[in-house]
Image (cartoon, rainbow, N blue to C red):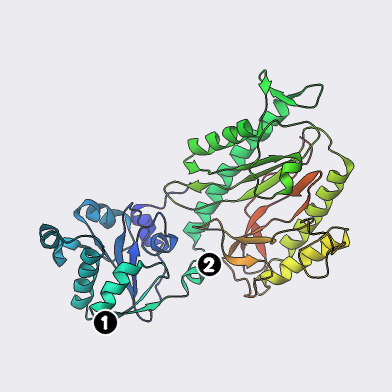
Amino acid sequence: MADLGGSDMRAAAPARRRPEPPLLFYADGYKFPDVYHTTKFLAPDPIIALEDVEELVIVASSLEEGRARKESRATTVVNMNEYGAQELSGQGVSGPEFWATIMKRFLDERGLKRVSVAPYFPLAEADRLREMGVELVIANDLLERRRVKRPDEIKAIEAAQRATEEAWHKGVDAIRRAKARADRTLELDGAVFTAERLRAIIESALLERGYASDGAICAPGPQAADPHQIGTGPLHAKEPIVMDIFPQHKQKRYWADMTRTVSKGEPPAEIRKIYDVVKRAQDAGIKALRPGVTGREVHELVEDIIWAAGYDTLRPGQKKDPSDPTPRGLIHSTGHGVGLEIHEAPAIARSGTKPLVAGDVVTIEPGVYDPVIGGVRLEDMLVITESGARNLTQAPRELVV
């Protein structure tokens, strides 16, 4: 993972637009990516931050002031004691009343009576600020602000992808080493090889590299027909195993996302057919990526290929047996944005009506599913360039391992 800390991080900060009105945060960067994206500061407790024209101010406790000065993008860091934090604590003031009072004094100092806030700004503090005469308006553009990735963000996402592939290779190597028993159950080092053990191999490798993985998907056979089934129980030879790995760096906070479907030995002919269709659909979706195209156009191109191959999609009119309520075929979107959240703008889906722009990082992950035999999904992650897209994924697409 590229180092994004200290002075290098501040040097990479983009020129800020003028917020209308200034943008006020009261939240922490671990749970709220907008805060981290704006300030590049991680703290377990909420911080106060204000973005206004070319200025970014953080109001921090004594516990975090020094670190905020060293690590954040803030142009100014102020200790909350300057707004009477110690005095308020001594009076027994706490909770929303404490924080609203600190924010009100901070805004008064700057002559601000109207600010924009995130949709998740806490209600109790918002109510108290309004009672104090501060007008709050909802900032509805925060997701769009994070869409176009800076070069340092792309480097962080690429580093996450490399770690993902290294962990995936360890999992695949274990599948290759496994032996098939007479009933096709896989055995590794003398014990039944399970989805749980495969996931542990992958997630341990990610943890060693600084990444957290909460439930990597290792779904064998029919379990793979449910796209978010993480997978349980014994693995078997000659059946598809969907491996969807999506880790987040524990400190840098950027995600990666990759899916491969593999089989220990040649799977049934229908799985091979599905794999080839999904691979062809993925190739077409990747080729279509460029600035100006919409996520909907890419998604419908992928749907048409899968439908023409004989499989259902969720588009009206693309179900072979409308009386059958069972989800079959392509039952999800083609992709999504990736960054400080695993699913963020833009959508490569029917809802993706905004044109792609250079700097978007997106996945292309078609899949075809059948509740009887399982499913196949392939997922690559790409960054949109001025002339097309650059694939950040290097793992091979090989069904039989």
Location of mark 1 (residue)? 113
> Quadrant location of residue 107?
bottom left
Q: Position of residue 196 (x, y in %)?
A: 61, 33
Residue 17 visible in the displayed image: yes
Q: Amino acid at mark 1?
A: Lys
Spatial separation of the CA atoms under disc 1 and disc 2: 30 Å
Neighbour tally class for label 1: few under 14, some 14-19, many 20 plus, Cα within 10 Å = some
Q: Is residue 154 left or right of residue 64?
A: right
Q: Position of residue 18 (x, y in %)?
A: 38, 79
Q: Position of residue 277 (x, y in %)?
A: 83, 54
Q: Amino acid at mark 2?
A: Arg
Task: Name which residue lies at 83% across and 44% down.
Answer: 271
Say if 372 sits above or below 116 in the image: above
Location of mark 2 (residue)? 147
Neighbour tally class for label 2: few under 14, some 14-19, many 20 plus, Cα within 10 Å = many
Residue nearer the viewer, 152 or 29 = 29
Q: Is residue 310 left or right of residue 108?
A: right
N-terminal of the pair, mark 1 or mark 2, is 1
Task: Name which residue lies at 25% across and 78% down.
Answer: 131
